[in-house]
Image: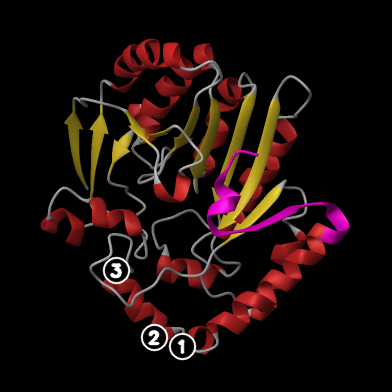
Amino acid sequence: MQVTINQAKSLLNKATGFIQDYDFTLNPYRGCQFGCNYCYASAFSPNAQLKANWGDWVMVKENSAELLVNELERISKKYDRPIRIYMSSVTDPYQPIEQKAQITRKILQVLIKYQPVLVLQTRSPMVVRDIDLLRQFHNLRINISIPTASERVRKDFESRSPSVKARLQTVEKLRHQLPSDDDYKIKFAITMTPLLPSYDEDLAKFIEQLVTVDRIVIQPFHSSQNQSLKASTPAKAIELKRKYEWWYQNENENYRNLLNRLELIKQYYGVEIFEGREGFGYD
């Protein structure tokens, strides 16, 4: 793993496109050690070599906390409402290096003072480490990414990521230790984005474990038709799509079947079901 310590010039970037409901994105790192082979973020690598080696390098924005204080002092004066921040859009704030570097934790300590509307997007159980800080936010949504119900599929598409079981357990721990009330509105979502194959024998138990969250977001696998697109599917993932032809040859039907099953959770448990961009808003 190639780890580089950088001094960032800016931390808050204007949110556009898929997460345009926010004011800014915030990425504590550049690159991601999880290296999911379908990840669109690899397209934003600094050069072709790093793009090819996605998952084998990470740049640590060492001065993030200090830089964030300066940016928030300047920016917050322009808003008469809480700033909306999405953390993170092209990295995972709780990838393994965070255990030592603690950049995300330092950022959270800064953000508590300014109380933004904050969304944390991660696939890592490490997020529970910061429960002491998270419970101090008045408007917080935690999105846990779980694109598949099947562990064997996870091992193919996300070999370096935590298990499906570990992520589901993370949701349960957060739900029990971060209660929501009128003053501290803490929400939880499972994001099945992009939706990966799931074996039917795994789906029933998996869906049962989703009933405690506020929201489920699903989105089809991103297009592999136009490789010039920044968010196009990397070649490794296209190869895996061939391995799982039994799913992808009927992708639309499988997607709709899962959506219909999730709608039952909405009907009986009141869980919000969203498709695509709409599901990534705080509200």
- Distance of label 3 from label 2 (alpha carbons): 13 Å
> Which percent across, then down, holds residue 281?
57, 43
Q: Residue 119 bears which disc, if any?
A: none
Residue 240 vs residue 229: left or right? Answer: right
Q: Which residues are magenta?
A: 267-283
Q: Which residue is drawn at the image coordinates 43% and 11% (left, top)?
A: 77
Q: Secondary structure at mark 3?
A: loop
Type of amino acid under label 3: Pro
The answer to whether the residues at label 1 and label 2 have Cβ atoms under 8 Å apart is: yes
- Distance of label 1 from label 2 (alpha carbons): 5 Å
Q: Which residue is mark 1?
A: 245
Quarter in which the C terminus is drawn:
top right
Label 3 neighbour load within 10 Å: few <14, some 14-19, many 20+: many
> Which percent across, then down, holds residue 216?
66, 55
Q: Which residue is mark 3?
A: 234
- Distance of label 1 from label 3 (alpha carbons): 17 Å
